[in-house]
Image (cartoon, grey):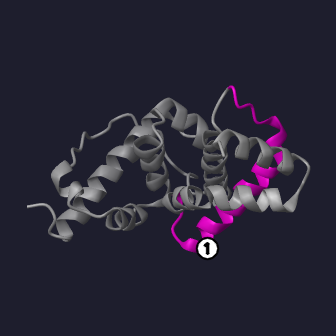
Amino acid sequence: MPNDWIDKKTIDGCISNDRRAQELLYKQFYGPMIALCIRYTKNEEDAIEVLHNGFLKVYKHIGNYDSSRASLYTWIKTIMVNSAIDFIRSNQKFKGQAELKEVEDVSMDNEAIQRLSATELLKLVRKLPHATQTVFNLYVIEGFNHREIGELVGISEGTSKWHLSEARRQLQQLLLTMHVLR
């Protein structure tokens, strides 16, 4: 059965508020979307809250989905990233951030990072301050540029660059304490 057919049938069911179609969509995208939500939150409860809020938005707006513009996965992922940012904003993690122009260029030891498992790296990233973690995820994982990040989270490009630099600096310190860097 082609994936496009499954997606179309599932989408049509979700548009009709068919609970089985909604459950199928949820199950089909749960794994990658919970992993995305976990990257933006400090604990599993918050990740699940972001996931559920994101899926509520997916169900509410699925009639607006246009397969000629993006795959269903990409469309849902975009909603989840925005839901994570909404969650962070609602918890005011970016309040009081100063406009910063000077950014220290911190390089990371790629070899040291490659020695870490994905779980170990996620644990390190989750130790970052929330705003710094969010900018790191948006820049490194999602591929947004600093202008886009600034618009998404309501900070300047300079502040976004500072958070990325700070994330790298703090991750390097955490790697040193783990004796991964020598």
Q: x%, y% of residue 72?
A: 66, 41
Q: x%, y% of residue 109?
A: 17, 50
Identify which residue is drawn at 8% across, 61% down. 182
Q: Is residue 19 above or below residue 143?
A: below
Q: Is residue 54 left or right of residue 178?
A: right
Label 1: which secondary element: helix
Q: What segment carries the magenta color?
A: 40-68
The answer to which of 32 and 123 lies nearer the viewer is 32
Tally of marks: 1
Q: Amino acid at mark 1?
A: Glu
* Magenta stretch: includes residue 113: no
Picture quadrant of residue 7:
top right
Q: x%, y% of residue 70?
A: 64, 32
The answer to which of 18 and 94 lies nearer the viewer is 18
Q: x%, y% of residue 106?
A: 23, 44
Q: Which residue is mark 1?
A: 45
Identify which residue is drawn at 59% across, 65% down. 47
Residue 18 appears in the picture as rendered: yes
Question: Is most of the magenta stretch helix, strand or loop?
Answer: helix
Residue 72 appears in the picture as rendered: no
